[in-house]
Image: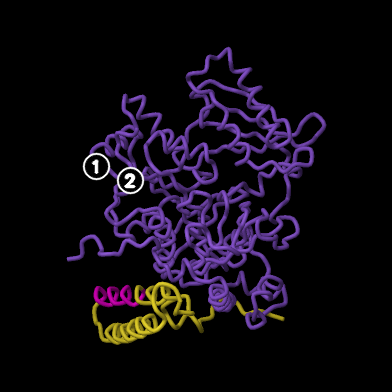
């Protein structure tokens, strides 16, 4: 591991993941668009922070993306 | 209140990524590639069809070898066809229409524009590509950027703007101004970084002199360009930019529909693929086989940063020379494209068995005393129907017109000695070739369409 010691990096990743959970909870409770969008942006930047540490495998912050499917079905 | 971000003065923007051992890097990239293939397969008709035709499903791609051998290439024409089938984005789009934050377009080979959508997150990643280069060359949040750029539908320096915001530095817009007004604005606001195409930067210097100003008096510290072969690809151009403005000159290699893929290397010998956001293969343009390290071929890029319109094994048509097994002198382990982009597969000319690259020609012409930075290369057929090239170059104002023939001979001889073939050279008076604000058009292919090399298809 370069620059950041491995255990320190693990701690940072853990803290960011906790922050995402808090932000996502706040997003669910938020009732007006200005606040919701600010929290969405915060979540995106937290995901980006995990990316900076190489810790995130999903390439988008929105979990729904991993299972979403659209477009015409394939015919064999 | 957040003012200029408090940051350390280390030489890397992100040392974790930039110096990651290659084995570790490749493991992370493989996981991302597998995720991306599944995402594109599940969310776009383009990739689902393509992979169906190739007889593969996302779960078949388990190793990097699977990725290299089984996954088909994607071309600009593939994306254009998907967009044409169901405008505006058709089966190339992977996100919901409402998730698109910004749309660009670029010219297609048939004249139909290619539309390039980005989500908000895509724009963050795209912008960040630039920051790796800024940081590496010494640009910091205290710097201020002057954008000599018109902010149109072309991607151009929009992504650079996103990068400057991410860095936390100042943005000064030169949009909608004449060249003279831009110079006056720079005199007043004293930016430290000039963002422009290299050709336009030279035009700015030329205009400064016409206004009776020394370009150095603008007080710039850096030139950071993109959009056409720049100070890394063309050392003579670098000398011209650095001596005109008194700056250090760098470039970024970007592909509008993919990203700002390769920020500057501080050594100025090349640019580095940002491997936190992209993966690349360099292939023989005709066979599609991966070429060895140190060889030249077509750059094939996969983006982890473009999720609105995914690009997986995308044929860029850019000719590069790649190096990766040893860390660069700058400390990065990322792929180095030595000399940045060396040419385009569309414009490779084979003259008497020798591949002639446009950057090689440009480098040699610029090195001959008495030439100006303005030139055009015309590809045509000779009287035997063989590929040939005419180089038209503007003389420096100090050269008398009666010496043009002699200068042309000198350039032709330098070209013959360096690349082994004789090209026709015509020297024209100063100011006779057009000036451009964005990419300068330097290559003109006059061959019949069927005679152009079908590379990268």
Look at the numbered disc 1 and give the secondary structure of its residue: helix
On the image, the x and y values in percent for residue B73 come to 66, 65
Residue B338 lies, in percent from the top left, at 57, 52
Residue on which disc 2 sits = B146
Task: Single out the residue that lies furthest toward the top.
Answer: B402
Tell me: B110 left or right of B6. right
Picture quarter with the C terminus of chain B: bottom right
Mark 2: few/some/many CA within 10 Å (<14, 14-19, 20+): many
Asked if marks 1 and 2 fall on the same chain, the answer is yes
Numbered disc 2: secondary structure: strand
| Res. A19 visible in picture | yes
Q: Which residues are magenta?
A: A33-44
Residue B414: horizontal and vertical position, in percent?
65, 30
Q: Is residue B357 above or below residue B329?
A: above
Identify the residue shown where x is 49% and y is 47%.
B227
Main SS type for the magenta part? Answer: helix
Mark seen at residue B189 = 1
* Whether residue B42 can be seen here: no
Chain B appears in which tint? purple
Answer with the quarter of the image where residue A47 lies: bottom left
Does A41 appear in magenta? Answer: yes
Quarter of the N terminus of chain B within the rendering: bottom left
């Amino acid at each position: 591991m370069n620059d950041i010691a491995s255990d320190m990096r693990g701690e940072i990743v853990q803290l960011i993941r906790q922050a995402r959970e808090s932000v996502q909870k706040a997003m669910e409770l938020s009732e007006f668009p200005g606040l919701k969008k600010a929290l969405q942006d915060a979540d995106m930047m937290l995901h980006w922070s995990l990316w900076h540490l190489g810790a995130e495998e999903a390439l988008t912050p929105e979990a729904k993306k991993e299972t979403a499917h659209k477009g015409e079905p394939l015919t064999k | 209140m957040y003012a200029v971000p408090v940051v350390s003065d280390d030489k890397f923007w992100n040392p974790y990524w930039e110096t990651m051992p290659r084995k570790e890097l490749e493991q992370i990239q493989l996981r991302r590639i597998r995720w991306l293939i599944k995402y594109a397969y599940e969310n776009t008709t383009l990739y689902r069809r393509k992979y169906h035709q190739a007889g593969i499903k996302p779960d078949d791609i388990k190793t990097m070898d699977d990725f290299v051998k089984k996954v088909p290439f994607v071309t600009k024409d593939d994306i254009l066809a998907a967009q044409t089938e169901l405008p505006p984005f058709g089966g190339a789009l992977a996100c919901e229409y409402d998730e698109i934050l910004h749309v660009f377009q670029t010219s297609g080979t048939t004249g139909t524009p290619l539309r390039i959508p980005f989500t908000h997150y895509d724009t963050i990643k795209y912008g960040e590509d630039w920051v790796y280069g800024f940081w590496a060359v010494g640009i910091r949040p205290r710097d201020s950027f002057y954008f000599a750029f018109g902010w149109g539908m072309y991607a151009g320096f929009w992504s650079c703007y996103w990068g400057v915001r991410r860095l936390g530095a100042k943005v000064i817009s030169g949009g909608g101004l004449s060249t003279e007004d831009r110079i006056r604005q720079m005199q007043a606001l004293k930016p430290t970084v000039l963002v422009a195409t290299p050709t336009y930067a030279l035009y700015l210097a030329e205009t400064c002199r016409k206004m009776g100003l020394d370009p150095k008096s603008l007080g710039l510290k850096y030139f950071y360009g993109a959009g056409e072969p720049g100070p890394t690809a063309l050392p003579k151009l670098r000398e011209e930019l650095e001596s005109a403005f008194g700056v250090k000159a760098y470039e970024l290699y970007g592909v509008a529909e993919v990203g700002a893929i390769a920020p500057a290397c501080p050594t100025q010998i090349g640019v580095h693929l940002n491997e936190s956001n992209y993966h690349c293969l360099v292939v023989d343009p005709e066979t599609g086989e991966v070429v060895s390290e140190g060889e030249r071929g077509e750059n094939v890029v996969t983006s982890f940063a473009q999720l609105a319109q995914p690009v997986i094994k995308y044929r860029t048509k850019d000719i590069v020379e790649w190096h990766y097994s040893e860390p660069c002198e700058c400390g990065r382990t990322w792929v180095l494209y030595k000399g940045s982009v060396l040419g385009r597969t569309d414009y490779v000319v084979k003259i008497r068995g020798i591949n002639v690259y446009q950057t090689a020609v440009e480098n040699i012409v610029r090195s001959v005393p008495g030439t100006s930075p303005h030139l055009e290369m015309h590809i045509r057929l000779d009287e035997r129907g063989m590929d040939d090239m005419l180089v038209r170059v503007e003389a420096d104002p100090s050269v008398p017109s009666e010496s043009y023939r002699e200068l042309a001979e000198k350039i032709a001889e330098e070209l013959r000695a360096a690349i082994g073939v004789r090209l026709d050279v015509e020297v024209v008076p100063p100011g006779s070739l057009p000036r451009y604000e964005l990419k300068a058009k330097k290559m003109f292919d006059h061959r019949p369409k069927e005679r152009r090399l079908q590379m990268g298809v």
